[in-house]
Amino acid sequence: MEKLYTKDTQAIFWNNNTSAIQRMLDYDYTIKRKKPSVAAIVAPTSGSKFEKFFYGPDEIMIPTFKTTAAAKAAQPQADVLLNFASFRTAYDVTMEALDLGGFSSIMITAEGIPERLARKMNEYARNKNVTVIGPATVGAIAPGAFKIANIGGTIENIVQSKLHRTGSCGLVTRSGGLFNELSNIIAINADGIAEGVAIGGDRFVGSVFIDNLLRMEKNPEVKYMILLGEVGGTEEYKVIEAIKAGKITKPIIAWCIGTIAKHFSSGVQFGHAGASANADAETAAAKNIAMAEAGMFVPESFNALPNKIKEVYEKLKAEGVIGEIAEPDMNVCPSVRKSKEFICTISDDRGDEATYAGFPISSLATPDTGKGIGDVVSLLWFKKQYPKWATDFIETVIKTVADHGPAVSGAHNAKVTARAGKSVVESLVTGLLTIGPRFGGAIDGAAEYFKYADDNKLTPAEFLNHMKKEGVPIPGIGHRIKSLKNPDLRVEGLKKYAAAHFPSTSLLDYALTVEQLTTSKKENLILNVDGTIGILMVDMWRALGYSEEEINEFISSGTLNAFFIVGRSIGFIGHVLDEKRLQMPMYRHPMTDILYDVQEAEKI
Amino acid sequence: MAQKAIREYDGKALFSKQWENYFSGFHYGFKSVLVSSGAELLEIANKHGFEWLKQEALVAKPDMLFGKRGKNDLVLFRDQKPGDVTLAQAAKWIDEKSAHNTTLLSGQSGILTHFIVEPFTPHSQEQEYYISATTVGEDDVLYMSAEGGMEVEEGWDEKVVEVVIPISMSDADMEHAVKANIPSDIPAANKSAFAAFAIQFFKFYRDMNFAYLEINPIVMLENNNMAILDLVARLDDTAGFMMRDTWGEIEYPTAFGMEDQSPEEKAIADADSKSGASLKLTILNPMGRIWTMVAGGGASVVYADTIADFAEANGGSISDLANYGEYSGGPTTSETKFYADTVIDLMTRHKDPHAREKILIIGGAIANFTDVAKTFTGIIQSFDEKAEKMKAHNTKIYVRRGGPNYEKGLKDIKEAADRLGLYIEVYGPETHVTDIVRMALEK
C-alpha cells in the first residue's frame, strides 16, 4: 500500500457518533468527493435502518446495521473500519472485523484497552496485513481524499490548515491534539500535508512511526516527513535504523516532546500512557540527539520547530523537489441548515414531469408503453422493475380479490354506510376498516405461518401440532363449501399460472403437502384463495431474489394485506355506487333478528 | 491509566486466592498480615486464624513498593539469631520504625506506614530460586535463575535465563520453551517441579493481567511446599473492568517518598474520575511563579518543555514551574471553572520570594471538538471571583488557543480580563502554540 486512503475510500463507522460522521460528510462535500466517505454505520442497539446527515445543503441517508458483518455484506467496497467502540468492546469489534476480512485498515479510538488485548489485536492485524491506526487516537487524514472523524477539527480549521487538499508533507504524531497543531504549523510555514497519522497515545498501538513512514516513503505525493515523537519507548530508533539501512531517503524533520521529564526523577507522568522513560535511551533528549545524528532535521526546541519546517520546505522548493500546489475549487458548507421532516424515496415531482421511482408517468401510463398496474405497483411499492411474470401475477391477484359479493362484512358495512347518505369515500373507508385479522387477513397470516413452518423445516404434522399449541386455526386453510372434489376455480387459476410462469414455487409445494394432511381430516380444509395468494407472493419474492429477512419484513409491514385492500376497494366502490344508483333508504336492522337478553345491573 | 504497582501483601493474597487454579500440586500456606502499627498487629494476633502470629517466629518489613529492604536494614528477622523474633518484638519494631522519618539508600524519604508480617521460613540458600515475568517490547519475557535472594542483581547476565514469549505463542510452544530453558544449575531433583511451577507462574502472570511480577526468592521446600519470601508486582490497571471480581479491592499506593497528593490534587483527581472529560493536576512546586492551565495531553507536555527551556535560558530555573496538568475531552463549564478555581487559588497563596510577577499560561493546541468558548466561560467565571487576589500577586495572563468557536472564546476572555483590570495577552492559531511562553519569559 503506498497510500493509506484515496478519494474513493469508504468506511464503515462502528458506533453512531453523529457529530463525527457529520464532520466527515462536511469534509466530503467541501472537497467534492463523489461518494460519501461513510458507507454504513454499525449501531448495535439502534432500531432504525438509516441515519440522516447533511451533505452540503442537502440531506442524505446512511444505512445503519446491527452488526459489522451485515454492514460489510451490504457495503463490501468499504474497506476501512472506524472503530468508535468503548475500551470495553473495542477489542472484540476489531477482532470480529479482522475475522470477517475485507478491511485494509482499522482505526481504533478507545483509550485504555487492556494492554494484553491490545497486543493480541495488533499482532493479529499485522499477520493479516491490516493497518491499525490507534488505539487512543483521533485518526488519520489524506487531505483532499479522506478524513477520519474529528481529526482536523472544524471545517473552518481544516480549510485554514490546508487540510482540504494534498500538500507535500507526510506527518506522523502520537498525540491527536498536537496533530492539529502541527497541521496548522505546516500550513503556515510550508504547503500542507499529503498524508497524516496520529498513531495514538496508548503504550501498545497498531501501526507505529516506522510503519507509517515507510508507506509515506513510497507515496509519490509525500516529499518530506515530519515525525513528532514522545518521551518513552524506542520506536524512534526503528526510524533511525531504517534511515541507516537506506529504506528511508526522504528528508525527515523530527522532534520528541517531553524534554521536561529529565527535571523530575520519578512519579510525574508527562503525557500519554506510552510516555514514560524506563531507560536513558527512552528520554526525549537522548532521542532528539540520536535522530539529529542520523541526519534528521531536529530543531533546538519545540518552540523552534516552525522555523525548522520553513527552512526545510524552502530548501526543497529551491531544489525543485517541491513544486507549486494549485488550490482546487471547494464547495462551501452552508452555516445554517435545516433538517428535513419528511423523506420520500418512491416518487419525485420536482422536475418537468413527476416520476414513479425514476420513470416519468407518461412512460408507464398509456397502453403503448406496455406497462400495466402491476408495473406501477412494483415501482411505487417496491422501487424495482419487476419482470412481466411478476407484474402479471400482481394484476391477477388484484383482479381475483376485487369482490366477493355483498354479504361479506366489509361490503355489508360499506353498503349500510352508503344507505346512511354518506359519500363514496366515507362509505369506502367504512368497508376498508373492516379488513383485519378476520376479514382479508388470512393472506398475511397464511404467508406468515406457512413461511415459518417452511423456514423451520416442520413436517405437515409438526406444523399442525404447532398451530394447535398456538391455539390458532391455520390461516388460508378451509372453505365454506369448496373441497378437493369441488375445487375453488380461482385457486386453480392461480396455481396454474404459477406453475406455468414462476421460476419456482417452493412454498406452494410445501402448502400442498399440508393440504393433503388437512383434507384427510376434513374435506373442506383446502388451501383457499387467501392462502394461495399469500403463499404465492412469498414464492414470487423468493424468485425475485429477496432475502428471507426482507420477505419477513414485507409480511410484518402488511404488504400482503395491501394487495387485498387495493383489489377489494374496487368491489367496495362498486357496492357503494350500486346503493347510490338504487337510492336505497336508510337501513335499520330488524328487531326480530336480535336476541335481547338484558338483566338489571347489579349494585357493586 | 497505565501500569500500577501493588503491595507485596496484595500480590501474595492474589496468589493465594488463585492457588488451586494454577498451582495445584504445590502448597502455599498464605500466612501474611498487613498492618500500620504494633497495636494493630497485636489485635490481629488475637483473632481466629491468626494464632500463628503468637506461635511462630516472625519476619516484619515495610510494604510500600520500594525494594532493597534488606540492604536498607528494614527487614526484622532476628533478635539474637535468625528466626527468633516474637510477636511482641515485631510490634515494638514496627512502632519504632514508623515513629520517625526514614531515608533509604536511594535517597527516597518518608514515613513508613505499612508493614507486612509473616512467619519466618527456615530454609537453605540452595532452596532459593528467582522467577519473574514482564513485557519487553511486544513480547513477554520469563526470567528464571537457580539463585534467589538479593545477590541476583549482581551478575544478572550469567545467572538469569530469559525466555521470550510472543503474544501469539501457543501454550504448548510456551511450555516447551520454558522446559527447554530451565537454568542448568537447578538441582536435577527439582528441575521438573521448577519447570511445572514456572509454566504455571507465567500463565498466572498472563491471565491476571500483571505488567510485572517477580518473586525473589521463591523457596522450594520439602513436599512441594512453596514459600514466597519477597514479591514485587505491577498490574495493568486498564484491565480493571474485566478483572474486578478476580482482583478484588486492590489499592494502588503512591511511591514511597513521593509526597502524598495535596487536597487540591485529590479534588481534581476526584472530579476527573466522575467526568467523561479529562482533568489532571500535579503540583511540582507550590512556590513556583509560572502556573499553567493547558488543554490537551500533548499540549501540556510541550508547554512544560518550553517553560523549562525558557526559564533556564532567562535566568530562572525549572523550579519556577509550579504545576503540570491538563483539562481536555470537552469538560463542562462548571468543571472548567472548578479547575481554574483550583489553579488560581494555589497560585495566589504565596508571594514570589523575589517579588516577581506571577504568570498564568492558559494554553492549548487547536482543539478537535472541544468548544473553546464554552470552556473559557468557566475560566472567566473564576476570574470574576478571584480577580482581586490575582492582581495582588501581579498576575500576567497569556492565552493561546484554537478550535471550535475559538474567536468567541478569545474575545470573551479578553473582555473579561479588561473589565476586571487584569493584565492579559490573547493569541489564536496564527501564533505558534508555545510562543506565549517565550513572550512571557523572554527578557
Image (tube, helix red, strand yellow):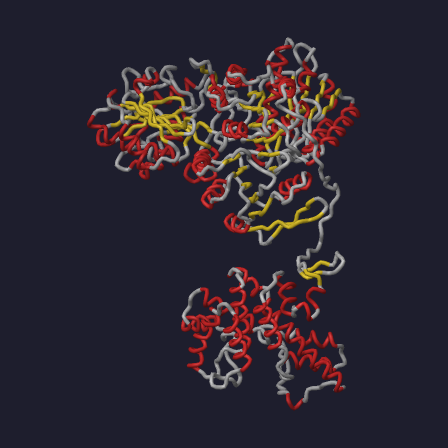
Identified at 69% across, 74% down, the residue is A429
Residue B418 percent coordinates (x, y): 79, 24
The answer to whether one can see residue A583 in this image is yes
Front-lying residue, A561 or A46 = A561
Say if B31 sits above or below A451 in the image: above
Residue B351 percent coordinates (x, y): 67, 15
Front-lying residue, A461 or A396 = A396
Front-lying residue, A168 or B351 = A168
| Residue reaching furthest to the top | B315
The answer to whether one can see residue B42 in this image is no
B109 left or right of A575 in image: left
Identified at 75% across, 32% down, the residue is B408
| Residue reaching furthest to the left | B189
Say if A483 sits above or below A39 in the image: below
| Residue reaching furthest to the right | B419
Front-lying residue, B26 or B174 = B174
Q: Quadrant of residue A534?
A: bottom right
| Residue reaching furthest to the bottom | A592
Viewport quadrant of the C terminus of chain B? top right
A71 left or right of B171 in image: right
Number of callouts in the render? 0
Residue A98 percent coordinates (x, y): 46, 42
Say if B284 sits above or below A76 in the image: above
Residue A567 percent coordinates (x, y): 64, 74
B334 left or right of A251 in image: right
Identified at 73% across, 27% down, the residue is B385
B2 left or right of A383 in image: left
